[in-house]
Every structure is written in C-alpha cells, then in structure tokens.
Amino acid sequence: MTPKQLLQESDLCVKCGLCLPHCPTYRIRQDEGDSPRGRIALMQALLSGQLESTPQLQAHLNRCLGCRACERACPSAVKYSKLIDGVRAIGYQQGDNMGQWARKIALKLASKPTLLSMGIRFLQCLPRHYLQKVCGQNLQRLIAFSFNLSRLIAWQTTYSPMGEKVGRVALFLGCMSQLSDQAALLSAIRLLNRLGWEVVVPPKQGCCGALYQHAGDPISAHEFQAQNRTAFAGQSVTAVLTIASGCGAHLKEYGDLSVAIYDVSDFLNRQPWPLQVKLKSLPQPVMVHDACSLRTADAVYPLLRQIPDITLIPLPENTLCCGAGGINLVTEPQIADALLAPKLTALRASKATILLSSNTSCALHFAAGIRKAGLNIEVLHPIQLLERQLLDNDHPTG
Ligand code: SF4
Ligand code: SF4
C-alpha cells in the first residue's frame, strides 16, 4: 500500500473502541497508545505529517503482537494488519523502525536455521555469568529458549508411503520450526506415510517471510516468497502442508503458489481416515491452545476426536493471544509473560498433562512458561499426538 492508501485505510477507523477489549497489549498496559485505536491514531498522525517518528511512538507500534483480534472485532472492517505492516515498512525504509538491535538479531537468527543453530551452539558454550554480563535481557531470553531446540538434520527429498499410495504432498519445513518443531515435522511425515501419502520436501525452500513482512521489511519477505515459489513449482503434489500455523497463514497470503496450502491438521481432517489405521485409546483430558493464526481452520478438534476416549478441552480465553506473536516473545518479555500467566493458571487447574499447540512460537512460549512454573505438562503439536496414538506405532515418542 502507498502512504496515501494507508492514510485512506486508517481513515476508515471511526474510533468506536469496540476493538479495545479484544487487544492483548491494551489489556496488559491499559494505555491508549497500546490499543488498536490508539495505534491507528498514531499511524494517521505519522502518515499525515502531524507527528514525527520518535522511539516512544515506534515502541507503541512495535508492541503490537500482530494477533489480528482487533480486525475480527472491528465493525468497520479496518484492515489493521495491512496498515501496521505498511507503516512499519515506511519506518524501516527511513531507518527509524527496527532500530533496536535485539529485534534485528532475533529476526535474522529466527529466519536462518543454519545461522540460528550455529549461533546458539556458540552462545550455549559461554559461561552463564559472562552471558548475563554482556547480553541484554532479550538475548538472554533467546538463549533460554534455545535449550529446547533440536540440532539441524538433513531431510530426505522424498518419504515413501506405507502400503498403497493415495497421493503426494509437499511439506513446508519453515525456518525456526526445523529446530523448534522438528519432532512434529517428523511425526507429520510418519503419519502421512502411514496414511498412504508420499511426502516430498523440496530442498531449496526457505523461511515463509512472515517475520520480515510484519517487521516492516517486505523486500526480504518477497525474496523468500520468490525462493519458495521456485522451490515448490513443478512438484506435482495435491497440496503443500505446513505444521506451523503462522507460516501457513502467510504462505496463503502469497496468492501465487500454484498449489493449495493447508495446515496439516486441516488437510488430514478433509481426507477419509483409512479403516485399517487404528488409534490407541487416550482416556485423559488434553488441553488445546488455539493459535491466533489458525482461528479460521478449526480442524484440530474433529481430527483429534478420532482418538478413542480423548477429552479435548479448549484452553480458557483461547481468543486472547498467548503473547508469543512475531518476535515479541523475545523482544517484549513482560507483555509475553503477563499474557501467558492466566493460561498457566488455567493449565495448572486443569490437571491435564498434555497441551496441544499448532504454532511454533506459541509452543516454545508455553513450554518455557510451563517449565518455569514447575508443571508436569508436555507441549505437543496435534499431529505428534495423533502419530503417537497409532496402534502400530513403533517409533519413539517425543
Ligand atoms: S473497532 Fe475498528 S473502527 Fe472501532 S476503533 Fe477499533 S479499529 Fe477503529
Ligand atoms: S493485532 Fe493484536 S496486539 Fe495488535 S492492535 Fe490488534 S489486537 Fe492489539
């Protein structure tokens, strides 16, 4: 969007305030500047030249989690996410956004798994007291999350189905997910193979670009888009599947991948379940976190109900972001932890031992919070649980 189009879009906001109760950052900070209405007013003032960009103004914009709860609540259909991405992009070009070095480092590292893996192994080798001295709080937090990450592995380009082949799909690996959700990616491959799907993993694929798009760098985001378009072209697959709902939502926004994009749960929920594939009973409550990016594809519940005796319980206040949006998990620790706290309280009260989440950063955020709170709760991707319950599963769990 051009600055003029952005200004026109911001003018659609009638300042009714109906979005305010739905905004997680407003709920925590109770500051108009950290509400959707306040941010739109700030963006209007910036775009019309009434206000100059200041670190304080940019901080209000940067604190937005990108959860889009305001869009869903807005009666005027203001395209808030387009607005904030556009304004951040202008700021990025002018060099007044992304000024915080922690944001830049987190963004670069998060989108390059090889770099991230190497950087993390190096930092993990340094003594803790030294890290505390030389690193800011944000980088220390990134390092704390890193202890949950797997080592990079070499992916096969094709994984063959068991038994009769029903079709062929491609798997999108993501960047961060290769380290943080590797077990879920491997579970997805094994489950798809067990259900008769051949899985291809195009080697030249890259980050989906969402982190860059939402941080005001659409040029880098478009470069990733072009890379993925080439990587997935000509694969002759029924669909490209994602396991991280945030990546899936962004890939769908490309609009020019010549093949359908599905979250893996959504895809499997649309397929007939083969009668010969039996699942073990799981007679216990399982909590489900609904990621902001998967609100429109509510496939997890019907798919997982195929597990005999399972009780799926939506986490209370599932419509409110857990605080992990974008890279705010690292760059806005106070907000991220304040939003997670009531969810941890609900988990503790539930007595459940499994929490399901379909989004990488949410799962990392929950796992870290659960560990810190001393709770005995395993955080799994829904597909991991489904694969684990296969009656003839002879793979190790986790
Ligand atoms: S609900 Fe929509 S129109 Fe009302 S203040 Fe929020 S963004 Fe503006
Ligand atoms: S995207 Fe989420 S955090 Fe950002 S203004 Fe809207 S409701 Fe608030």
Image (tube, grey):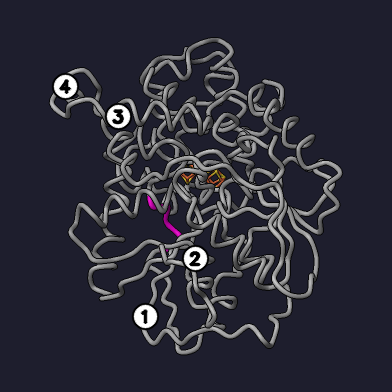
Label 2: state its secondary structure.
helix
Between the residue at mark 3 and the residue at mark 1, the CA separation in whole angstroms equals: 35 Å
Q: Is residue 36 visible?
A: no
Amino acid under disc 2:
Gln
Instruction: Tell me whether the residue at label 3 lies in contact with that at label 1, contact meaning CB atoms closer than 8 angstroms.
Output: no
Classify mark 4 as within 8 Å of ligand 2 or not, answering yes or no.
no
Instruction: Tell me the tag on residue 130.
Output: 4
Is 197 a magenta residue?
no
Label 3: state its secondary structure.
helix
Identify which residue is drawn at 44% across, 37% down.
64
Identify which residue is drawn at 33% across, 25% down.
122
Q: Is residue 221 above or below residue 390?
A: above
What residue would you read off at disc 2? 384
Amino acid under disc 3:
Asn
Label 1: state its secondary structure.
strand
Q: Tag 2: Cα neighbours inside 10 Å, few (<14), some, or many (≥20)? A: many
In this view, the mark in front (2 or 1)? 2
Answer left or right for 86 relative to 336.
right
Q: Tag 4: Cα neighbours inside 10 Å, few (<14), some, or many (≥20)? A: few
Instruction: Tell me whether the residue at label 2 lies in contact with that at label 1, contact meaning CB atoms closer than 8 angstroms.
Output: no
- In primary-sequence order, the first of circles 4 and 3 is 4
- x, y (%) of residue 87? 58, 24
Which residues are drawn in magenta?
318-322
Q: Is residue 138 above or below residue 278?
A: above
Q: Is residue 60 above or below residue 157?
A: above
Q: Is residue 159 above or below residue 2?
A: below
Instruction: Tell me the tag on residue 361.
Output: none
What residue would you read off at disc 1? 285
Identify which residue is drawn at 76% across, 37% down.
231
Instruction: Tell me the tag on residue 138.
Output: 3
